[in-house]
Image (tube, grey):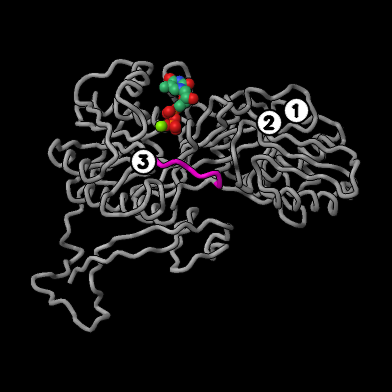
């Protein structure tokens, strides 16, 4: 039985936690002062807990064996960096959330995706609640010439949007952005947690019932999460984050959740005069600014999904002027850096206790793969001793607490990437030696512990 009930509740504006009372701190995400009262009007279906059980009627479970297992159809956009992150393209009937800081390029990316899909004769509808038609047209002009099959709508009322979508019957819909959308049945301001959640559930229905692929833009709060992220992330099929330094021209599209593919893949773009361009070889740009012959600079290799990426690890170690030495990590895990410093102190007997230490992964990437450990260790020691590591040397390996260097996955791909970019030697874990036996044109130094690795730079 459905009944309509108007109530109000308090929602944490950071994570969407719902409470009947106001609270100073959210018990779920521990943010202070984040609760706001929102009125909610929901039609509630009486649960089976009321004692009445709904008769099953004709509802029957299906034999798994009998479900035809056709391969999923996907709309490939032809933008490789985008398709790869999605696992091959947009799945019809799926709901995708594209999150990111304001101004990072979400609208630009989706406009370019729409352009490609329209060119592939897909019916595309772009709904904006943020910009006027002229503003969108101005952006579209920078990107290129649009042909037919691409329609625009400026609207924020979801009731109207649902009707238009049902009548127009597009295959792909973009909602820019979810924070501007408004569902009349919910008595809360656009952008509030309950409004965002209810709007998303309307879109979810629309996607599944009409079999339309819907892409939703979501702005990220200053804490780095989409407003009401938990509710949103659970509801949608795929969550992509578009990140990068706004001052920098490089942008990274990262899959955080994907019901139709892996979440390890990333896409790299470059923001230019005419929109976003794909960066097909990110290693090149990540190590492009590496100083020559400088101490404390080491090239490491990390895997992003199936893709090897070289990056420059920088360390600066200098005498401290403070009671407690300063330690700072940019792009890498702070605790991991401290642990590696402790390993160096203990195993190499190097007095780093009176030294400030800074570690930076150049290029604005955030990487937490242990395979970069050995490069961090070598960069720290190189800076401490003021002895450079050869510029054409690649270093990778996980470092354990006894100073041992442990094997990593996909060692061969990493070495091949280095060879492709003209590196002359690689320092690799001994455990990976066998996989690398047949690689030519590059010198492989296998090491069992950090002492052996350091020996390669200390003359
Ligand atoms: P936009 O897609 O509007 O960001 P979002 O939707 O995530 O808020 O991107 C805005 C920024 O991108 C803006 O600062 C201008 C820049 N830009 C370019 O540098 N080149 C271009 O061709 C376009 C379209 C935008
Ligand atoms: Mg935008």
Secondary structure under the numbered disc 1 in the rendered image: loop
Q: Where 212 falls versus 338 (above or below)?
A: above
Q: Which mark is residue 390?
A: 1
Q: Nearer the viewer, residue 137 or 277?
A: 137
Q: CA distance from mark 3 to mark 1?
A: 53 Å
Q: Nearer the viewer, mark 3 or mark 2?
A: 3
Label 2 vs 1, first from the N-terminus: 1
Secondary structure under the numbered disc 3 in the rendered image: helix
Label 2 sits on residue: 425
Q: Residue at x 17, y 38 (%)?
A: 164
Name the outermost residue toward the left: 58
Q: Is residue 301 visible?
A: yes
Label 3 sits on residue: 180
Q: Give the magenta-colored segment's residue range.
A: 217-223
Label 3 vs 2, first from the N-terminus: 3
Compared across the picture, whether 261 is left or right of 342 comes to: left
Query: Alpha-carbon neighbours of circle 3 within 10 Å: few (<14), some, or many (≥20)?
Result: many
State yes or no: discs 2 and 1 in contact (Cβ < 8 Å). yes
Q: Which mark is residue 10?
A: none
Label 3 vs 1, first from the N-terminus: 3
Q: CA distance from mark 3 to mark 2?
A: 53 Å
Residue 375 location, quadrant: top right
Q: Is residue 444 visible?
A: no
Residue 1 location, quadrant: bottom left
380 is within the stretch colored magenta: no
Where is the C terminus found, in terms of image quarters? top right
Query: Alpha-carbon neighbours of circle 1 within 10 Å: few (<14), some, or many (≥20)?
Result: some
């Amino acid at each position: 039985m459905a009944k309509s009930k108007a109530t109000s509740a308090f929602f944490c504006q950071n994570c969407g936690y719902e409470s009947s009372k106001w609270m100073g701190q959210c018990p779920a995400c521990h943010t202070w002062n984040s609760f706001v009262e929102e009125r909610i009007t929901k039609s509630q279906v009486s649960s089976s807990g009321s004692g009445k059980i709904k008769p099953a009627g004709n509802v029957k479970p299906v034999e798994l064996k009998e479900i035809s297992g056709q391969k999923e159809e996907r709309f490939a956009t032809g933008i490789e960096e985008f398709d790869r992150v999605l696992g091959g393209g947009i799945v019809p009937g799926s709901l995708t959330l594209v999150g990111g800081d304001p101004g990072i390029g979400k609208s630009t990316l989706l406009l370019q995706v729409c352009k490609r899909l329209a060119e592939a004769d897909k019916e595309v509808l772009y709904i904006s609640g943020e910009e006027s038609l002229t503003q969108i047209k101005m952006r579209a002009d920078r990107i290129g010439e649009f042909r037919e099959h691409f329609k625009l709508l400026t609207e924020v009322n979801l009731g109207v949007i649902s009707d238009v979508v049902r009548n127009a019957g597009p295959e792909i819909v973009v909602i820019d952005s979810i924070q501007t959308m408004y569902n009349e049945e919910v008595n809360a301001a656009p952008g509030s947690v309950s409004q965002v959640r209810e709007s998303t559930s309307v879109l979810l229905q629309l996607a599944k019932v009409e079999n339309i692929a819907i892409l939703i833009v979501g702005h990220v709060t200053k804490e780095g999460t989409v407003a009401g992220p938990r509710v949103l992330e659970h509801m949608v099929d795929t969550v992509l984050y578009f990140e990068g330094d706004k001052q920098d021209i490089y942008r990274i599209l990262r899959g955080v959740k994907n019901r139709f593919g892996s979440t390890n893949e990333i896409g790299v773009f470059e923001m230019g005069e005419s929109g976003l361009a794909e960066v097909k070889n990110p290693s090149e740009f990540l190590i492009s600014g590496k100083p020559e012959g400088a101490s404390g600079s080491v090239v490491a290799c990390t895997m992003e999904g199936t893709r090897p990426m070289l990056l420059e690890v920088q360390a600066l170690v200098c005498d401290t002027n403070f009671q407690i030495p300063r330690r700072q990590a940019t792009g890498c895990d702070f605790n991991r850096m401290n642990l590696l410093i402790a390993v160096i102190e203990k195993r190499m007997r190097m007095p780093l206790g009176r030294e400030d230490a800074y570690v930076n992964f150049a290029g604005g990437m955030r990487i937490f793969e242990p395979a970069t450990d050995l490069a961090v260790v070598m960069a720290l020691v190189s800076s401490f001793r003021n002895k450079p590591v050869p510029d054409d040397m690649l270093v990778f390996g996980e470092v354990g607490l006894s100073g041992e260097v442990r094997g990593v996955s996909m060692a061969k791909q990493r070495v091949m990437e280095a060879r492709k970019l003209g590196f002359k030697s690689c320092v690799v874990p001994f455990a990976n030696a066998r996989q690398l036996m047949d690689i030519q044109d590059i010198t492989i130094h296998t090491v069992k512990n950090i002492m052996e690795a350091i020996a390669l730079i200390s003359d």
